[in-house]
Amino acid sequence: MPWKGEKDPYKIWISEIILQQTRVTQGLAYYNNFIEVFPDLKSLAEAPNEAVFKAWEGLGYYSRCKHLLFTARYILDDLEGKFPETYENLLKLKGIGPYTAAAISSFAYGLPHAVVDGNVFRVLARFFGEAIAIDSVKGKELFTGLANRLLFKEDSAAYNQALMDFGATICKPQLPDCFNCVLQQECVAYNSGLVNELPVKEKRLIKRKRFFTYFIFMTDEGVLVRKRIDKDIWENLYEFYLVESSKELHWKQKDIKQWLNEQLGINDFSIIKISDPYTQHLTHQTLLGRFITVKLPIVPASLKHFLELNADELSLVPFPKFINRHLQDQSFLGGTIEKILV
DNA sequence: AATGCGGGGTG
DNA sequence: CACCCAGCATT
C-alpha cells in the first residue's frame, strides 16, 4: 500500500481519513487519485469545494470530506501551513479522533501512541478473551489502555501497522485463520472456543425506510439540480427536485400532472420517462425510489432556486451513488445528454 | 450515552 | 440477509 512507510504527515492524514470505516480495497483508488489531484496541503486548501467533493464522490461519509477541507484550510491559514506534531494537537483538528491522531503520531513522527481501530479491538478482545463491549465507554478505555501498554515504543509505526495487518488478514471478523495463527497457543478465545463470540458489541442497528421520488426536470439548456445543505444524508452533494414520502408512491400520469400543477405551478410539460425502482442500503436507512424525467419549455418560478446545468457542468458536481446509478443507466454523463434534450 | 453518517465486501 | 470496515461529530 502506498501509504506504508510514508512519512509525509499530509499523505498519512489523507490516507487515514479515507480509511475511516472503509476497507483498504475500497479506499486505495481514492487515495491515489486524491494525492494526484491534491499532492500537498496547499493544493487541497486552495481547491474549490466542488473539486474536493468530486474526488470524494462515491466514497461515502461525506462529512469526512467536509472536515478534511476545513482542516486543510485551517492549517494553511491559522497554523502557517505547519502540520501539528503532537498527539494532543492533532486531536484538536476537525475530523481527527483518537485513532487518526495515534496513526499520524506514530506513522509520521514515530511517537508512542497505539492505534485502536476495529482490527485492534478484535485482536485484543480475542487474544485476552475480553468480553466487555467494544462500543461502550468502559470497553474503549480498557482496550485503549491495553493497547498502549502493549505498544512497542521503539517502533510504534511498525507495531501499529503489524497489529492492524494481523487483524485484517488473520484475525478477521468472519472465518479467522486460526489454523495458521502464530498466536493460537496463547489466544484465550481460541482455547475456549469463543473466537466467534468476540468481540462483543452491545448496540443494535435500527434501519428506517425512506421513499424518494426524484423529478429530473430538463430544459433546452440543461438539468435542474440543487445542493443538499440540510443535516441529513449526502450533505454537500447534489440532487434533483425531491419528493420524499413515508410510503412508496406509485406515480401515474394523473398523479404527476396533479403534483406538478399543485405543488410547482407547472402546466406545460412532457413526461419523458418513469424509471424502475432503485434501492440502496445505508448504515441506518434503506432508500427506495424512482426517477421521473420531465421536459419543460421554461424554468418555472417555483424552481428558480435550482441550478440549470448542462452535461459538462453536470459532470463536475458530486452526486450520491443512488443518483449516479440512474445517471449511468440513462447515459446522462458522457455527452449523450444533448440527444435527450433535443 | 445515543445517534447518524455511505458504500461495498463477505459468508 | 446480517455484519463489518485503518471512526468521528454532534446532541
Image (cartoon, coloured by chain):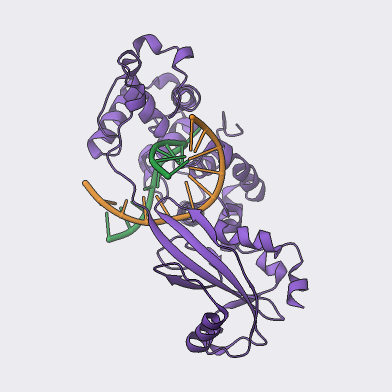
Chain colours: A purple, B orange, C green
Whether residue A320 appears in this view of the structure is: no
Image coordinates of residue A84 in percent, x first then y, are: 44, 43
* Visible residue check, residue A237: yes
Q: Quadrant of residue A296?
A: bottom right
Q: Quadrant of the C terminus of chain A?
A: bottom right
Quadrant assignment, res A248:
bottom left
Residue A88 on image: x %, y % = 35, 40
Q: Position of residue A8 (x, y in %)?
A: 56, 37
From the viewer's perspective, is A120 left or right of A136? right
Image quadrant assignment for residue A221: bottom right
The answer to whether A277 is drawn above or below residue A195 in the figure is below
> In front here: A13 or A292?
A292
Total label count?
0
- Residue farthest to the top, as pictured: A185
Depth order, front residue of A320/A43:
A320
Q: Nearer the viewer, residue A242 or A88?
A: A242
Q: Position of residue A321 (x, y in %)?
A: 57, 56
Taking the spot 63% from the left edge, 85% from the top edge, the residue there is A269
